[in-house]
Amino acid sequence: SAVISQKPSRDICQRGTSLTIQCQVDSQVTMMFWYRQQPGQSLTLIATANQGSEATYESGFVIDKFPISRPNLTFSTLTVSNMSPEDSSIYLCSARWAARDNEQFFGPGTRLTVL
Amino acid sequence: GNSVTQMEGPVTLSEEAFLTINCTYTATGYPSLFWYVQYPGEGLQLLLKATKADDKGSNKGFEATYRKETTSFHLEKGSVQVSDSAVYFCALGDSSYKLIFGSGTRLLVRP
């Protein structure tokens, strides 16, 4: 199965600071995505990370708050900017390989707590 | 727009009981349908999938059939085990491969 790693696995941050989450996959992928899972809730798509260009954001998410980079086909970062307690969530990256029947696999997630 | 509706949890069953978790969807076009599972303290794992009407996805004793006429993708297992205790998410994949998740259903299996 696919290997997707995320760093850090968890963090506790102060209000007003920013955190960058890294996502690394073990082989070149077609697409990468970032999701948010708020406490006790389901997953919501934040954006599609596009290789070499600006990410495509879903309604309710903006680049200034969640800047995303994807410099190559196996790596992406999500930054949570100017954090508030409402940003406390699990952030997950996912990847899709066309060669693997378009299945989408998820990383282990980054558990963020904002004080 | 596209959406997924799952039955509310938690669902509590005794070991070896029959499991059904209902999932219905609203979508334009012909989406793919998925069940993901999140075990306690672990990440999200793909459990099974179906990509077109009447397809049956199966894995680890779980099954779900893509029913276009009822827009449903109910998850079933004939005999649950304590190790099946987890949160189960139904999801829809649209033409741009984005996933839309249901609210999740927590399953608790008692010995």
Image (spheres, grey):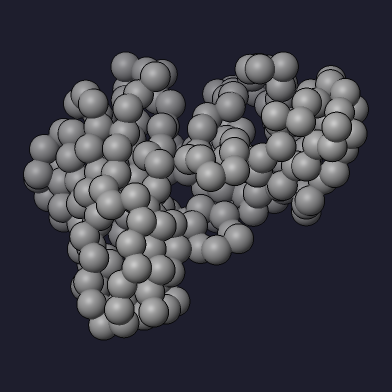
Q: Nearer the viewer, residue A32 or A89?
A: A89
- Could you tell me residue B36's position as x and y percent? 57, 35
Q: Does B46 sit left or right of A107 as displayed?
A: right
Q: Is residue A74 above or below residue A57?
A: above
Q: Is residue B87 visible?
A: yes
Q: Residue at x 71, y 31 (%)?
A: B84
Q: Quadrant of the N terminus of chain A?
A: top left
Vertical position of residue A18 compared to residue A112: above or below = below
Left or right: A43 as drawn, with respect to A107: right
Q: Is residue A88 above or below residue A93?
A: below
Horizontal arrangement in the rendering, residue B51 relative to residue A66 (left or right): right
User: Which residue appears at 59% of the width and 59% of the height?
Assistant: A41
Give coordinates of residue B49: x percent, y percent: 57, 25
Camera sees residue A59:
no
Q: Which residue: 84% across, 20% down?
A: B78
Q: Which quadrant holds residue B63? A: top right
Q: Position of residue B29 (x, y in %)?
A: 54, 37
Q: Toward the viewer: B13 or A67?
A: B13
Where residue B18 sits, quadrant-wise, is top right
Q: Is residue B22 left or right of residue A67?
A: right
Rendered-image quadrant of the C terminus of chain A: bottom left
User: Residue A26 at x, y = what percent?
Assistant: 23, 26
Q: In the image shown, does A52 or B28 lie closer to the viewer? A: A52
- What residue is shown at x 84% (from left), y 21% (from top)? B79
How many dots with numbers?
0
